[in-house]
Image: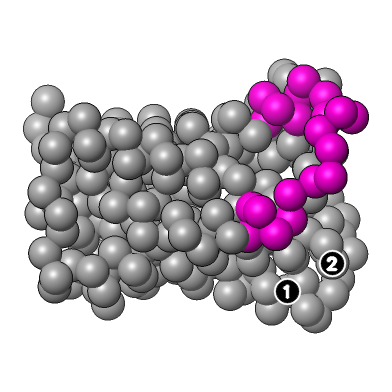
Amino acid sequence: MDKTTSGWLNGFIGVLIFSGSLPATRAAVADFHPLFLTGARAVIAGLLALLLLGSFREKRPAAGDLIALTVVALGVVVGFPLLTALALEHVTAAHTIVFVGLLPLATAIFGVLRGAERPKPAFWLFSCIGSGMVASFALTQGFTASPLGDMLMLAAILACGLGYAEGARLSRRLGGWQVICWALVLSLPVMLVLALATLPATFSGTGHSAWFGLAYVSVFSMLIGFIFWYRGLAQGGIAGVGQLQLLQPFFGLALAATLLGEAVSPSMIAVTLAVILCVAGAKRFAR
């Protein structure tokens, strides 16, 4: 298997793992406050990262890498989870899909700015069409508009796109799992304070599904998923592999239908197939 194919496979696995985040988060926020969930998931993942780094006796990052790792931490460990949690207090989950549809485009732009990638013009055409279809599908699902919620989601997408691109750039030198682990460790003190400040007075009413949701977003969404995702971006190209994120909302909805009993409409299947064609087109013209 060549490096590019391996990158797209790793990226696809990462997207599948991230797709479970939405159903898991929905289950968790039923009993946990969004701010506590944001802090707790990062703390659990950070402690696991410390264990991994210690077990493999990884060398500390060079001083020149600390700024880049801080950008990764602010983008994907602190920024995106926190900003989306705050946004969901003002807008519906369906409304956020409009912005999630813009994430592959944001990742590609930062891949050009930070990763020195130069996709072909046809790539941008497929990327824009795919992003537009995801956003249009979300608009048909209905949403409650809020200027503050929109600003928070836009900031979340920009933070996440930058964190993805910066992490992928570092992964080429440090390795995918090392980058996310060091980013988690760097953010651990801040997220520990957030978790403690929002700690519930009691967990007596917390259901099993909420604990399962917390476990999933902590172990898979915050750690394991990034191991595959950053490796995929580094191997296959930030701009190209990033287009796989167009499939994430539909995978998430499919999982929600399976696990939460939500309906899957024929239009959802049709748009998913169209998006797959856009991803295939973007892959062809990514380099």
* Front disc: 1 or 2: 2
Q: Name the image quarter holding residue 70.
A: bottom left
Q: Which residue is mark 2?
A: 90
Q: Which residue is mark 1?
A: 150
Is any atom of residue 211 visible in this view?
yes
Residue at the location (75% across, 30% down)? 210
Q: Name the image quarter holding residue 27.
A: top right
Cα distance in 3D space between marks 1 and 2:
9 Å
Report whether 78 appears left or right of 59: right
Report whether 131 appears left or right of 173: right
Residue 254 in the image, given as x and y percentages of width and height? 67, 28
Residue at the location (55% across, 54% down)? 192
Q: Earlier in the sequence, mark 1 or mark 2?
A: 2
Q: Nearer the viewer, residue 29 or 4?
A: 29
Q: Nearer the viewer, residue 283 or 71?
A: 71
| Image quarter hosting the C terminus | bottom left
Q: Nearer the viewer, residue 252 or 162?
A: 162
Bounds of the magenta span? 194-213
**As shown in the figure, which amino acid type bears the numbered disc 2?**
His
Report whether 64 appears left or right of 229: left
Residue 203 in the image, given as x and y percentages of width and height? 81, 33
Q: Nearer the viewer, residue 129 or 2?
A: 2
Residue at the location (68% across, 73% down)? 152
Task: Decide whether residue 277 is among the magenta residues.
Answer: no
Q: Which mark is residue 132?
A: none
**Residue at disc 2, secondary structure:** loop
**Residue at disc 1, secondary structure:** helix
Residue at the location (70% across, 59% down)? 197
Q: Neighbour class for label 2 at 10 Å: few (<14), some, many (≥20)?
A: some
Residue 263 in the image, given as x and y percentages of width and height? 83, 27
